[in-house]
Image (cartoon, rainbow, N blue to C red):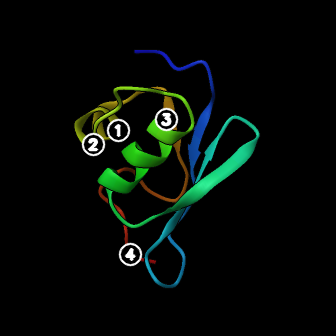
Amino acid sequence: MTPALPVVIYPPAADGGRRVRAGDRFVGMAYTLLDVAEFLNRAGMEGVEASDVAAAEWIEWRGGGPRVWEP
């Protein structure tokens, strides 16, 4: 799956949440991979699951990959 929108996950905040951007807008603050998947589905990327998020080469992870949720 290659999305139509570029996806960026920003470094963890003090509370462990990571901002999620799809295209040119922020779609939410994620605390788990499930949150990221839900935000991407709501942004129009239907069928994205947490396992897709963890393995996706099309997601740009800043400040650590999909296993990093601590500041």
Mark 2 is surrounded, within 10 Å at the Cα level, by few (under 14), some (14 to 19) or many (20 or more) other residues, namely some
**Alpha carbon separation for disc pair 4 and 2:** 18 Å
Q: With 14 as the anchor, is 52 left or right in this view?
A: left
User: Looking at the picture, how far across and down is residue 57, in whole percent?
Assistant: 42, 27
Secondary structure of residue under mark 4: loop
Vertical side of 6 occupied by 71: above or below = below
Find disc 4 in the rendering and name its residue. 70
User: Looking at the picture, how far across and down is residue 55, in whole percent?
Assistant: 29, 33
Amino acid type at image mark 4: Glu
Q: Earlier in the sequence, mark 3 or mark 4?
A: 3
Find disc 1 in the rendering and name its residue. 53
Mark 3 is surrounded, within 10 Å at the Cα level, by few (under 14), some (14 to 19) or many (20 or more) other residues, namely many
Instruction: Give the quadrant of the N terminus.
Output: top left
Q: Earlier in the sequence, mark 1 or mark 3?
A: 1
Find disc 3 in the rendering and name its residue. 59
Asked if disc 1 and disc 3 are in contact, CB closer than 8 Å, the reply is yes
**Alpha carbon separation for disc pair 1 and 4:** 18 Å
Find disc 2 in the rendering and name its residue. 50
